[in-house]
Image (tube, rainbow, N blue to C red):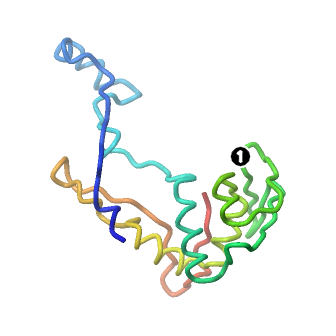
Amino acid sequence: MRAYKLIPAISSYPGYDLNTFKQDFPDLARDEDRPLINKVIEEVYLVGSTFKMVPALAALEEETVRPEEIIYCGGTYSRHGATKTCFRQIAHGSLNVSRALIRSCNVFFYETALRLGIDDLTRHAEEFGFGSIMGLGHLRGLRFTFICRPLPGVGSRGCYPVA
């Protein structure tokens, strides 16, 4: 599956009037919202909930989670000295992978990614194109996406999944 190499649509709506661009340019160049930047290819954004498909599919493929397996969400998840929450600290209760995707449950995917381990998670993320050049160089230079990497010589202990 290499669908990530195709871009069916790409759009960045300019936040300025092309009719007055020349006289507005000094203000546009100083604008904190950066309207001169093509947000589609020149910005880096956290992937957020769209990334949840990666640990879901990876855990199913690696059989660290079964499709019908239930993981409980109490609204918070504490590991390695950090506490993470679901959106608005909502407790989703008992979820299988399908319901966790539907509810976009952070706790389910923290647990799933931790069970999977950073090495398998990274490998599957790379299969989806994370961490690679996006191939938009012809638009304006090379663009990269980023994923967490284990620390050299430390392996899986050096990096833990966070969203």
Image quadrant for the C terminus? bottom right
Q: Which residue is denoted by mark 1 in the rendering?
A: 87
- Residue 145 sits in quarter: bottom left
Residue at image point 52% right, 54% down: 50
Q: Is residue 109 above or below residue 149?
A: above
Residue at image point 74% right, 53% down: 85
Q: Is residue 27 above or below residue 53?
A: above
160 displayed left or right of 130: right
Q: Residue 111: horizontal and vertical position, in percent?
A: 71, 69
- Toward the viewer: 60 or 85? 60
Residue at image point 19% right, 47% down: 140
100 displayed left or right of 45: right
- Toward the viewer: 26 or 109? 109
How many numbered discs sit on the rendered protein? 1
Looking at the image, the residue that sits furthest to the bottom is: 153
- SS for callout 1: helix
Q: Residue 123: horizontal and vertical position, in percent?
A: 46, 78
Q: Residues within 10 Å of mark 1 (few under 14, many from 20)?
A: few
Looking at the image, the residue that sits furthest to the front is: 68
Q: Which amino acid type is shown beneath numbered disc 1?
A: Phe
Image quadrant for the N terminus? bottom left
